[in-house]
Amino acid sequence: QVGARSTIRGASAPAPGGHGQVTADSLSLEVDATGLRLSGAARIDGTPARISWRERFAGGDADDPRRAVELRGALDAAMLEKLGIAGIEIGEAAAPLRLSLGAQGPNDPDRFTLTADLGPAALSLPIFQWSKPAGSPGGIEVSGRFADNGAIEVERMSGEAGDLSFAGAARIGPEGEL
């Protein structure tokens, strides 16, 4: 039986997909013969988040992913600005956000699912003369994979809030082009 527990202090790494930086003052790390688990409070480009990362070395069920990473945070005006998303205005209340990443086998690409609960947030899209008050339901789900060349394949995206809904797919190239 092999195992270790540690606290990592002053951690810094590129964010999943290489877009942004994840930092943490203190993370809990556990390692044994079957894998590793890392968790704790973090910041993604300065925005508070929680991280949970599990990497399977051996054993486990065939359906158990080789890698599972979950980041939880909040979508707010500062994050929209950092992501370069213009044209969406968000009120004081943030929208809870969850990003799950994973890969089944050693040669499989990392897949992702991003969900946001838009209910708590007041939103507006001035270009469409549309708005949603805080407290009315809404949500977004985006899923896809990270390609080997640095592109992001958005295989499915959908959202609904008030009388606005959307669905589609996209490819974001390595240089950020659609």
Image: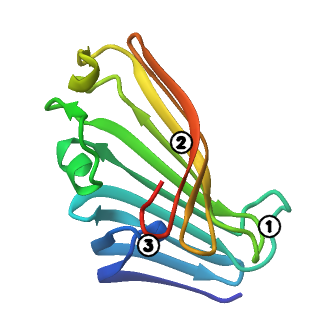
The coloring applied to the image is: rainbow
Asked if labels 1 and 3 touch by Cβ distance under 8 angstroms, the answer is no
Q: CA distance from mark 3 to mark 2?
A: 18 Å
67 sits left or right of 174 in the view: right
**Badge 2: how crowded within 10 Å, few (<14), some, or many (20+)?**
some
> What is the x, y in percent for residue 151?
55, 66
Q: How many marks?
A: 3
* Between 178 and 74, the one nearer to me in the picture: 178
Q: What residue is disc 2 on? A: 142
Q: Whole-percent x and y of residue 27?
A: 36, 73
Q: Image point 21% across, 63% down: which residue?
A: 46
In the figure, is residue 20 to the left or right of 59? left
Q: Secondary structure at mark 1?
A: loop
How many C-alpha atoms fall within 10 Å of the one at disc 3: few (<14), some, or many (≥20)? few
In terms of sequence position, does the residue under pointer 3 or pointer 2 come before the other?
A: 3
Viewer-nearest of discs 3 and 1 = 3
Distance from the alpha carbon under mark 3 to that under mark 1: 28 Å
Which residue is denoted by mark 3 in the rendering? Answer: 18
- At which x and y percent is residue 59? 81, 73
157 or 107: nearer the viewer? 157
In the displayed structure, does residue 139 sit left or right of residue 80? right
**Relative to 101, residue 136 above or below:** above
Residue 60 is marked as 1
The residue drawn where x is 38% and y is 12% is 162
Q: Residue at x 78, y 71 (%)?
A: 105
Say which label, 3 or 1, has the lower sequence index.
3
